[in-house]
Each structure stands twice: as structure tokens, then as C-alpha cells.
Amino acid sequence: MSPEGLLPKGSKFTSITGDGMKIGVIGTGIVGRSHAAKLALLGHEVVMGTRNVETTLGVHERDMMGNPPLKEWLQGHPMVKLESFHEAALHGELIINATRGEHTLEALRNSGERNLEGKVIIDISNPLDFSEGALPSLLVANTDSLGEEIQRAFPNAKVVKTLNTINARLQVDPDALMSGDHDVFLSGNDAGAKQRVTEILRSYGWKNVVDLGDISTARGAEMMLPMWVRLMGVLQTPLFNFKIVR
Ligand SMILES: NC(=O)c1ccc[n+]([C@@H]2O[C@H](COP(=O)([O-])OP(=O)(O)OC[C@H]3O[C@@H](n4cnc5c(N)ncnc54)[C@H](OP(=O)(O)O)[C@@H]3O)[C@@H](O)[C@H]2O)c1
């Protein structure tokens, strides 16, 4: 996708605050890359975090989904810097968690508790368990969620769960799906943090932001994943989304 294709029609190359924010993206998969590219395009200063920079840059093959090795991707996105989880979290005034759900808590611990203190963490992860095959179950559900686990592990951070029910490409470009008139959910305990995240979502082009309530409502958003995965099987594409009709 061209960088221009990531911008909603009519959007400006300015950030929500007018100045670029410092953002730490924890995670180098397709979700981390999509947000890093979009946020850099919107004028933010983005550092992406990985476990080990040398190891990550030493990968020369495409991944299972056909995505290019990160070294090649970074050459096409010179505005994005790659550092360790710790350095990326230190850099960010706002943090995006885009790590594999089963390792999210470990990745955030490695980011440094002090580096997360007082900061908004946009949590996009899903607690998917692939141990029984390609159709995942959830590692945590019903009475708890990964969003809540993160909030408990880092009580001084402001966790906002969002976008986890949407494919990475659509997360940062909702207009790629017809009119963009479809819904994104939001859960979190802090009203100010949710407002900041809503502004970022709007800068991506999201119009319908549904605030589900406190972070315990992340249970519902995460439990949509078994449905999402099955819909992808039926529709034969990840480019779809939920829309609430009243
Ligand atoms: N793919 C989508 O469209 C989509 C949509 C909605 C939500 N999500 C959720 O978003 C998150 C990211 O998804 P993704 O597809 O971009 O990539 P992913 O493969 O699920 O996660 C990649 C990241 O996880 C880190 N990681 C893997 N194993 C680790 C370990 N043992 N310890 C610490 N960190 C580890 C990797 O670190 P390194 O950088 O060191 O390799 C990498 O940064 C997931 O939770 C996923 O469920 C994905």
C-alpha cells in the first residue's frame, strides 16, 4: 500500500495536538508496522520496539504472511526508528501495544514499568491460543481479559483497549472499506485517556467510536475474536468489520 493510501481523504499531515507526539510502538508485526507508518505520516515521532534489534534486523526472509523482513520495511519507512522495547517505551509519551497476546505482559515488563507510568497504553493485542491449531481459542475470557491483566500489571498506566476486532490494514485506514461507516470499540477506566485515543482514531479516519465502558468491557471486545476468525473463514478475506445497527 502506498503511504498516501494510508491517509483518509482530506486529512492533514498534522498530529492531533498540532505538533508531532512522541509515540512508542511496542511490536514489529503487521499491526506495529501499520500504526508506525500511519503515525509517522500524520507527523508523529515514532520509535518501534522489538526484543532484540540485532536479531530482528538479521532476519532476511518474508514472514508466514508474506510481509517483508523488517530491515527492508524500515528502508521504505525512514521516519520510523527501531529500538528495543525499553527504548521505544522510554521515548513514547503514548504507547501502543502490538505484541503477540501470549507474550504481551512479558513484552511490557521488558519495556520497563517506569517507562509506562502515567502514560496511555493503546492495547490492540488479543489473547489468542493457537496451541490446538489454526482456529484459536482465548487464553483469558469471560471473567477477565488481557486488557484488564495489563491494567492490573501496570496500575499507573492508562490502558485503553481498542481496534483489536479489526484487521491491521483497516485499523489505520477505515475508508479502505467502502464509506468507513463501521464501528470501532473502546474500553478503559480513564475518561481523558479514552478522549486522547478517540482523537487518534479520528485522525486515522474513524467516525463511529463506541465507548463500551471501563476496562472490564475489554472482555466483550476480546471475546469477539472467535467470531471474527470464523467470519474470515467464511468471507475468505480479513477486510471486513462489525457495524452496530439500532
Ligand atoms: N494481525 C492483525 O491484523 C491483528 C488485528 C487485530 C489485533 N491483532 C493483535 O495485535 C497483536 C500484534 O499482532 P501482529 O499480527 O502484528 O503480530 P504478532 O506476530 O502477533 O506479534 C508480533 C510482536 O510480538 C512480539 N513477540 C513475539 N514473541 C514474543 C516473546 N516471546 N516475548 C516478547 N515479545 C514477543 C514480537 O517481538 P519481536 O519484534 O522481537 O519479534 C513482535 O514485536 C496481537 O496480539 C494480535 O492478536 C492483530
Image (spheres, rainbow, N blue to C red):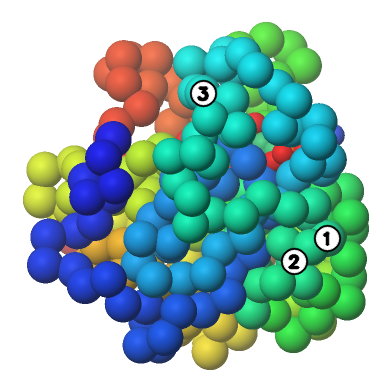
Q: Give neighbour class at mark 2: few <14, some 14-19, many 20+ (Cα, 10 Å).
A: many
- Given the image, on which type of amino acid does mark 2 rest? Ala
**Residue denoted by label 1:** 86
Residue at disc 1, secondary structure = helix
Per the model, the C-alpha gap separating discs 3 and 1 is 24 Å
Residue at disc 3, secondary structure = loop
Q: Nearer the viewer, mark 2 or mark 3?
A: 3
Residue 175 visible to the viewer: yes
Where residue 222 appears, as percent x and y from the top left, is 58, 46
**Residue denoted by label 2:** 89
**Is 60 or 17 nearer to us in this picture?**
60
Residue 199 visible to the viewer: no
Q: Are marks 3 and 1 in contact (CB under 8 Å)?
A: no
The C terminus: image quadrant? bottom left
Q: Are marks 1 and 2 in contact (CB under 8 Å)?
A: yes
Ligand 1 near label 3 (Cβ, under 8 Å)?
no
- Given the image, on which type of amino acid does mark 3 rest? Pro
The N terminus: image quadrant? top left
**Residue denoted by label 3:** 68
| Left or right for 64, reference 173 | right
Where residue 173 appears, as percent x and y from the top left, is 28, 50
- Given the image, on which type of amino acid does mark 1 rest? His
